[in-house]
Image: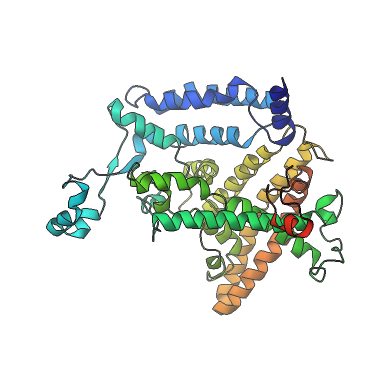
Amino acid sequence: MDAKLAYFTLVNRIVPGPQSLSYFVPLIVLPIAFCIPPWTVSKQTLCAITLPVITGSLVHAWIIMGGIDVISFDMLLHAYHLLLFNNPRRNFLRVVEKPQHTIGAKDHTYEAKDQLGEDELTKPHYIDQPYPTNWTERLPWIGTLLISMRFIDWKIGSPSHDSRQPARHPNPPSHLRFIATALLRTTIGFVVMDLTSAWTQQDAYFKFFGVSVDAALPQTSIFAVLPPRVLRCTIMALQVWATVGQQFQLPCVLPVVLHYFGLIPDAWAPHLWPTFFGSFRQMFTSPGLFAIRNFWGRYWHQTLRHYCSGPGVWVADLLHLPRRSWKRYALLSAATFFFSGIVHIGLVPRDPMFAAIPASRIRWLILGFFWLQPVGFAVEMVVSVVLRRLRVRKEGLVVLNVGWFVGWCCAVLPLLGEAGGHLGYWRVWPVPVSLWKGVMEGKWLTWI
């Protein structure tokens, strides 16, 4: 009974989660749908049968939950992207490594290199695999498709995407270096979360509702001379960077270890994949005002890019909008952040435990942050035209991009800051062992 009550509190007051069997229906229907070959059931028929079932089951699950959650809305976008907006059974190609003839046992590697040349022996060869006709190949083809968020090693009919397949890290690190980097990133992330939490526990903006982001800083702090909005937005940005940008590599350590011992193929080795995050420095070096567009398009992770932009691509193709046109770009940007905003309101439960405002208002704050991003894109596009005519020097463009990025973050991040406060994000010390508390207060364990 205690476990049931704890789960009920978790999914209704802390973070939304499944509360009915209908939540799991898409996980069954979608694999079954793709097991049916296109020469048996057409795309139109498959959509007519499966999409109402998937949509209806998720709507029922949301009614029971009192709102959506991130995973279930992702499932809905996933289903529509693969079933309606695309036709993987006809048009998708899985890029697989062609099996090489075995030269001999592992002890004869150097002898094989002498016979064939090192490049020929080690260079992988790839083939494009369409929807398989036999079950032995079809099941792994379907399984890989359904878990591919970024469609790495898939040709999906997008020239800009397909030209980079098979996608690999340009300079893949060694197994040991990847593991060491993952541990270092996790440690840095924990330290940053620890230090920023030390600030949120003393700043009235993070502790109490209704305090303006521009309110005076604690006078006892050495940071009191800084602009309050800039400092508080920096704290929020660092917390997001530490949790999202620094923790993703640690779960990848296990498959990297398995790859080292030859237990999984290259395609499943995370250290060989394209990086999840781009270069922060390169955000500011484009010839024009590109900081916001580069942040979302080149630096930040692209996990949801295909699913959130899929509806926009579909509509743009129906309207025959040419590629690289401003109209198409505007439509795709608007659609991507429209659906990305809806995905992220799935973080808001039915009755948030710490909130002083209704859940609906918290959702609007999150939507506001994401739905404002295309406005920033539009500003950059207009200003970039002016800058090209003025022929501003590269150094000036870097300074302008940095200043614009900081200003934009200070304008929109408070929306997430207020939402995070009502969700209780600033109330809990996020790391179980705190260096700050240990040194300053002698209390190393924060959760007990």
> To which quarter of the image does residue 398 belong?
bottom right
Q: Nearer the viewer, residue 413 or 404?
A: 413
Vertical relation: 382 (above or below) 264 = below
In the displayed orientation, state which residue is furthest to the left. Answer: 115
> To which quarter of the image does residue 127 belong?
top left
Q: Quadrant of the C terminus?
A: top right
In percent of the image, x 68 and y 33: which residue is there?
16
The location of residue 433, given as percent across then percent down, is: 68, 50
Vertical relation: 138 (above or below) 123 = above
In percent of the image, x 65 and y 53: which residue is there?
240
Q: How is the image coloured?
A: rainbow
Q: Quadrant of the N terminus?
A: top right
The location of residue 388, given as percent across then percent down, is: 55, 73
Vertical relation: 158 (above or below) 285 = above
- Horizontal side of 48 relative to 218 (left or right) equals left
Q: Nearer the viewer, residue 126 or 392?
A: 126
In percent of the image, x 46 and y 32: which residue is there?
83
- Horizontal side of 160 relative to 429 (left or right) equals left
Q: Nearer the viewer, residue 319 or 215?
A: 215
The location of residue 446, given as percent across then percent down, is: 73, 47
Residue 227 visible, this orientation: yes
Q: Nearer the viewer, residue 290 or 8?
A: 8
Residue 89 visible, this orientation: no
Vertical relation: 361 (above or below) 434 = above
- Horizontal side of 154 relative to 289 (left or right) equals left
- Horizontal side of 333 relative to 424 (left or right) equals left
The location of residue 246, given as percent across then percent down, is: 57, 54
Report the number of discs: 0
In the displayed orientation, state which residue is furthest to the front. Answer: 442
